[in-house]
Image (cartoon, helix red, strand yellow):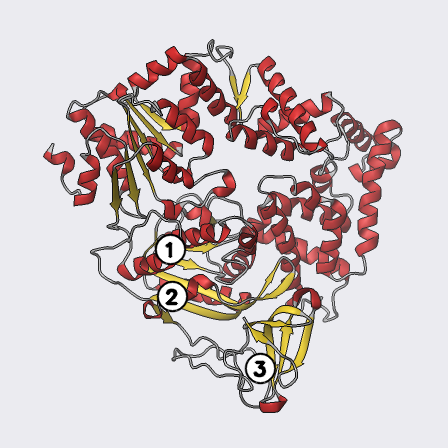
Amino acid sequence: MSDLLRGLNPEQLAAVTLPPQHALILAGAGSGKTRVLTTRIAWLIQTGQVGPHGILAVTFTNKAAKEMLTRLSAMLPINTRGMWVGTFHGLCNRLLRAHYRDAGLPQLFQILDSGDQQAAIKRLLKQLNIDDEKFPPRELQHFINAQKEQGIRPGAVEAWDEHTRRRAELYQLYDEQCQREGVVDFAELLLRTYELLSRNEVLRRHYQERFSHILVDEFQDTNPLQYRWLRLLAGYPAATGTAMFAVGDDDQSIYAFRGADVGNMREFEREFKVQNIIRLEQNYRSHGNILDAANAVIKNNSDRLGKNLWTEAGAGEPIRVFEAYSDLDEAQWLVEEIKALVRDGHLSSEIALLYRSNAQSRVLEHALFSAGLPYRVYGGLRFFERQEIKHALAYLRLIANSDDDTAFARVVNFPTRGIGARSLEQLADTARQHKCSLHAAIPLLSGKAGAVLSGFAQLIAQMKEGSSHLPLPEQIDHVIELSTLKEHYRSEKEGQDRIANLDELISAAASFIAEERVAEDGTPETHENVLASFLAHASLEAGEHQAGEGDDALQLMTVHSAKGLEFNMVFLSGLEEGLFPHENSAMELDGLEEERRLMYVAITRARQRLYLSFSQQRMLHGQTRYNTSSRFLEEIPAGLLKWLKPRQNRSFSGGGSYSAPAYQSAAPRREQNAGGVPGLRIGAAVAHAKFGQGVVIGAEGGGNDARVQVNFGAAGIKWLALSVAKLEIL
């Protein structure tokens, strides 16, 4: 027993050895929650309070479940194979397999993954002869899964309009199709299990009596149905003798967009009358300055259960902050810092570069590619390898060369335009007979196949004609618009990221032509040559410098993807208002609080050193944006920060015009006011009675002659004399 408990701190020991009652363990980042969970299970078994078959442990990933079982095998001389340790979906599958008749399923029912589910929905719509543009399969899939995750069957859907009523009918028909075919989707696994246990009292009592201890990892990420499922097994509201041990961190709840409800933690505390709330606050990952920064940021959230991370590892180094003039400058600085770290002997794999939005990776990837630094995009694809980008590039390739059969095959029916497999087979046969490309074979076809494919050929011709004289960024914008790719992705659950990447492709084109590429003879390249050069550039960046498996490489990822990971060195880029916190958070209930939790997660990924950076201007989604630094940066105490160069003196008090600052050595920042107006500087947010809110992006002159340039968004960019304009500093 002493070996089992050796090395636990007082709070960990208290959590592990709690009596068999409901308990809530608030486990801060890096506080050893996995050790507490596994040791709790081992202690319960070793002390004879429960047998291995009396424990139900729920995790959120198969990886976490396997790690827990591996640790238990090392702690105890037992066979863990029969233990109920797994994900919600895995455990529900296990229960339904055992009781398939009671659940109304065939013994060998099959599980539809996300792709299979979408294919089943497409097949249903085709059978019903329903226009998939009016009811896009991805949007209908999201609707069905969202209802199931709320525990809502088709008959209980609240249909406030005709479109929703029709979607509910399709949901019903989809359920009937799945039942006929003996298949279930992921959301159905949980809902079917919940319904089975709800209506079958004998079965419910069996599992309530069997599982005397239920342990739940990452409790803050549970959705409403998952929590109801846990309540049912724990015997709520009656006291069944089952003890629920919930481990989570409300400060790391960042998956609301997936349906997670951090309020489940409060509900659990209230409904189960939890008396034992233990806070694991000692951190074994990060140095003190990093933890102090995380604590300072997260304390600004109002509805917290509350905890304060600390460490015995010492304060460590200050948090390094860099302010760049542009996103390109920021990327170049990141490359130089990373090179310096590698020269000093740090492994690239221990360095992470984090960003809020996937679209930000394009500029960073380009800088790393140009510098020859190998990197790996964790939890996602490199920019030019992403599906939506490859689709857009395929359209561009057809403009450049209509005989490109690979590009043709990729987008001839994407987004769907009613071109079936049979029509494509006829086209391929015709192309082989005449020894020509697929595109060239279209005029040789007749009948329905010829008609639908002629429409695609006309689309490509329209794209080419309409963009032939446009600069590259406008050309790409024009092609993306005609392709209807954006409309297609708007129906996806996470389609906004794909749309943002399409917009970022336009930014990539703008950056590409900014390098003033010219032909070998010194004359400017034609539009056709520029497009061809850009397509070659995209192919090279997609295919080069991708680190192989096991290679030492820099880790790139979104902050969402970084949850659960840790690195010696962490760079967090793009700390600007509108980017992080994301501008969409202002339109969502509790959106800003979730963004702040995301910032807390980002900070606590760092073990030894943390870098924060932002830029005064950024090319994003095809437009140059002028943002102020993130409020989250301002929430970190100044004493924890080390500015790697002075925050740019963006104000103006004397004559002359503002220009982009050169890199300078570190020095204290001194604020200077413009025209006697305190706080008015480049980047300041202001309001004007006529033009509305804006951001100061330029300045010139001094005294009574001082003028500022303000970007008012929809109202445009204006030069205003300070002596006349009544600007309010926000």
Q: Residue at x 37, y 37 (%)?
A: 219
Q: Type of residue at label 1? A: Ile
Where does the image place residue 334, in percent across and percent down from the top left?
45, 64
Name which residue type carries label 2: Ala
- Give the image location of residue 718, x and y in percent: 68, 75
Read off the residue under disc 2: 340
Q: Is residue 519 above or below residue 127?
A: below
Mark in front: 2 vs 1: 1
Q: Position of residue 646 (x, y in %)?
A: 43, 77
Secondary element at tag 3: loop
Characterize the local packing of mark 1: few (<14), some (14-19) or many (20 or more) Cα atoms within 10 angstroms: many
Task: State the residue at coordinates (48%, 13%).
Answer: 103
The residue indicated by pointer 1 is 298
Tag 2–tag 1 contact (CB < 8 Å): no
Q: Quarter-wise, where is residue 360 in the image?
A: bottom right
Most foreground residue, 227 or 561: 227
* Residue at image coords 81%, 35%: 435
> Can residue 9 be seen here?
no
Q: Mark 3: few, some, or many residues within 10 Å (few <14, many ≥20)?
A: some
Rounded to the nearest angstrom, the CA distance separating label 1 from label 3 is 36 Å
Q: Nearer the viewer, residue 531 or 128?
A: 128
Amino acid type at mark 3: Tyr
Q: Which residue is tagged 3?
A: 658
**Horizontal side, residue 551 vs residue 679: left or right:** left
Q: Is residue 383 left or right of residue 46?
A: right
User: Disc 1 on helix, strand or loop?
Assistant: helix
| Foreground: disc 3 or disc 2 | 3
